[in-house]
Image (spheres, rainbow, N blue to C red):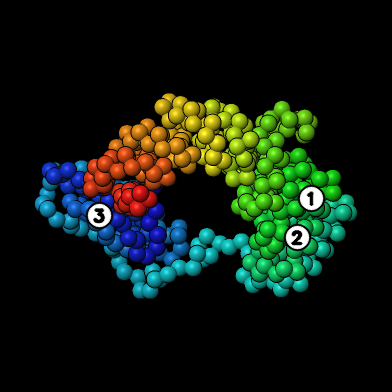
Amino acid sequence: MPQLWPGENTITVYGNISPQTTLEVTYVWDDLTGKNKKHTVFVKNTPFSYTITTSGKKWEDVVCKALIIKAIPKINNNNQIVYASFGKKIKNLTPKSIPTNKFIGRQSSPKLKKPSKCIKIIKKNLTKQKKPCSKKELRQIKNNIYNALLDLMVLRPIQAKEIIKKVIFEDISGNKILACQALYLIAGEEAVPTLIKILKKAPAIRWDTISNWLHTSAMAAFILAQINNSGAKKAAFLVADFLDNKKLAQKIGQNPRKIYRFTDLRWVWIKALGKLGTPYHASILKREIFSPDVDGAALAIKALGEIGDRSAIPDLLQILKTHNWPPQGIYAIEALGKLGDKNLASVLYPYLNHWDEDYRGATAIALGRLKNPEALPYLKAILNKEPFPWVKKEIIKTFQCY
């Protein structure tokens, strides 16, 4: 359901409307000045933008109850607002801008602590962890370290680098994932050796549970993929091992599929391998593209395009031909474009006329990468009839590639 917020909401209608049809668009909502308020427009020409004003101070003051879109017989050739209920006005009720923390809250403290104070808090609480703690005490320790890390992530003082590493090595309250993010924000590429030690499950790092190690390893792999330098790429084989369920089961002593949200973790490792891997790792990803987990399969298809191994082309063509899940097809088109075989252009031409604009856009981008001049007439044929501005923009950019 589209959301209406307190204040002014700009609504824009895009698309093609047949000559004998008018589009009727109605929003129904409750706010502080009344219930079942309504705003209706007749749209004949697109794009058409208009404003709905609601009354409220907080996000929850406005409840969008319905969005009704009807195709009705043509009224006239104009766009018009036919009904708008505003109800009783309340002076200064709706501010022009609302600080987000007023209605969705905030994670960090209202006043940031000094870096030295944050470092002191973390040191103190890491020491407390080494002694016997009740669950209540451990929760408090977790919160103390967590809040100090949040402040350090905003302030980013370089002197905090070592204490954040200590959280990664010593913490058992559940802050290692956040500490990885903090280390990356503060130390940048210098975080690589520590992140690789996490993937190796280095003995020097203390772990309270296997689940915590796997979840932290997913974050480490994600960050290494963001860094993506020569040092980070050394982690590719370690990341690949996480996708081998048998090898991973031997390492952790249990079936990894029983780990909380393990499928989601595999998605992270697949994406990371696409960034960090080499053609050597393509065989691992080629196994994944036929997985019954269609989301993981789609990400593996995308990753194969990142790695750039042309041996994947037959499998990607098979996926494109037989897929049922749209992301698989869109990512297959994207991957084929990145693999750079000009002869693939003819396979992609039909997707310039696909009913889904995401397919058309992905195809335009892929043809730009393939740089096959035979694609130009196909691109020219669809340029003027393409209704989506972003797809048209990609088609124009593709012309500039030739």
Q: Which residue is mark 2?
A: 164
Q: Which residue is mark 3?
A: 47
**Cβ atoms at labels 3 and 2 below 8 Å apart:** no
Query: Which residue sits at x=70%, y=45%?
Result: 235
Of callouts 3 and 1, which one flags the residue occurring earlier in the amino acid sequence?
Answer: 3
Where residue 172 is drawn, which disc sits there? 1
Q: Residue furthest left?
A: 76
Does 103 sit left or right of 47 as displayed? right
Of callouts 3 and 2, which one flags the residue occurring earlier in the amino acid sequence?
Answer: 3
Amino acid on which disc 3 is placed: Pro
Say which element carries label 2: helix
Say which element carries label 1: loop
Amino acid on which disc 2 is placed: Ile
Query: Which residue sits at x=73%, y=33%?
Result: 248
Q: Residue furthest right?
A: 131
Of 282 and 92, nearer the camera is 282
Nearest-to-viewer mark from 2 and 1? 2
Does 143 sit left or right of 125 as displayed? left
**Cβ atoms at labels 2 and 1 below 8 Å apart:** no
